[in-house]
Image: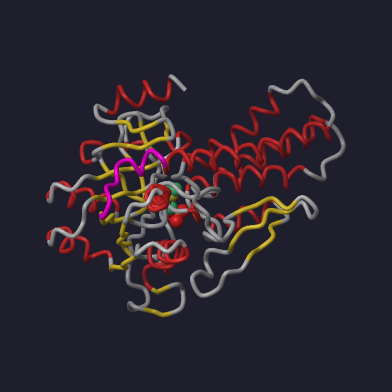
Amino acid sequence: VKVYLPFRTLEWIEETESLRIIDQTLLPEREEYLDLRSVEEVYGAIKVLRVRGAPAIGVAAAFGTYLAIKDEDSDAEALKKKLNEAADYLKSCRPTAVNLSYAVDTVLEEVETSAEDEPSALKRRVLATAERLRAEDEEKCRLLGLYGAELMEDNSTVLTNCNAGALATCGIGTALAAVYTAKAEGKRVRVVCCETRPLLQGARLSCWELQKAGVETTLICDNMAGSLMRSGAVDMVVVGADRIASNGDVANKIGTYPLAALARIHSIPFYVVAPSTSFDLSIDTGDDIPIEQRPEEEVRTVRGKVGIAPEGVSVYNPAFDVTPADLITAIVSEFGVIEPPFKTNIAEVLRNE
Ligand code: MRU
């Protein structure tokens, strides 16, 4: 099956040596592309979510490491020093999605294990690694779509949170890849998007790309999911992940955990769709996942524009929550569907690949 989406989340422009991204802060009103030409610009774009979603920020950061060293011509040592500084800088940008450190560390490893000591050769290697990570992510998305679609029956309604679609990746997405693939296979699948306050990735981004793909889409406010599930209208909940611990606990966009709890109460299956680059086997449980806290203004206003609370009221604004493994029906990876018990099955699936 072939899924085609008429936009590019991120692409490397060879002639100008720049990373072209769709500026996600402007969606859905405007579809504009931005060329990032320095590591600082990449860092800034990730920080304010012009480029976002776990796999996409990883690949953007990998290209960012190249932008940091592309003009360093003195010697290999100076280049490696600069590369390491850029790596630390980029990894500090957003703490929760492990894809970011995975991608940056992959670049570092490629350079460290290289026998080359010509700056020009090392630079080519960094750029080639970033491009490889991009292509691999695209392929992982395709496979996630195929395995995820198997879980979807014809004529079903899928509820999702945030944006785990093409805009979050270099391919057709994670959770939404399953929807696009099921549709391409001829199944009728409807999607309900939770708006995803405070930054509204569900309303602004998921609805935008689902509409472009011709998927039947319904938008709800986050607090409407319970009543919709109780009405019997939701067949499954499908979300992405920013980091999955060894025991199957999943960090994803804030609001995911309450959806999992509601799904359990209403006996609705709850699936997580994520590439291997979102798994972190160095940590035992979700308690060890660092949760990004974001600026208070995101909660006191809508999109920084319209105030909705008295100035100075205190705010709690974690960008992610952790869904405990026992609320998850299965995790779809590019290697197939992983079922409980997650601790043994995740280790087995990832070790074999
Ligand atoms: O803060 P964001 O918009 O980067 O958060 C993104 C999410 O939480 C997605 O659901 C997650 O990255 C999985 S998407 C492939």
Query: In this image, 117 relative to 269: left or right?
Result: right
The residue lying at 38 percent from left, 38 percent from top is: 147
> Is 325 rendered above or below residue 112?
below
> Would you say residue 54 sits in the magenta stretch?
no
Number of marks in the image? 0
Magenta: main secondary structure: loop
The residue lying at 33 percent from left, 43 percent from top is: 272
> Is 187 rendered above or below residue 286?
below
x and y percent of residue 239 in the render?
34, 49
> Would you say residue 148 sits in the magenta stretch?
yes
Please tell me which residue lies in front, 181 or 237: 181
x and y percent of residue 213 in the render?
46, 61
* Residue found farthest to the front: 186
Quarter of the rendering containing residue 230:
bottom left
Quarter of the rendering containing residue 281:
top left
> Is 53 rendered above or below residue 275?
below
**Scheme of image coloration:** secondary structure
Q: Which residues are magenta?
A: 146-155
| Residue 45 appearing in the image | yes
Query: In this image, 17 relative to 60: left or right?
Result: right
The residue lying at 44 percent from left, 72 percent from top is: 303
The residue lying at 66 percent from left, 45 percent from top is: 63
| Residue 292 appearing in the image | no
> Is 344 rendered above or below residue 63?
above
x and y percent of residue 145 in the render?
42, 44
x and y percent of residue 127 in the render?
72, 40
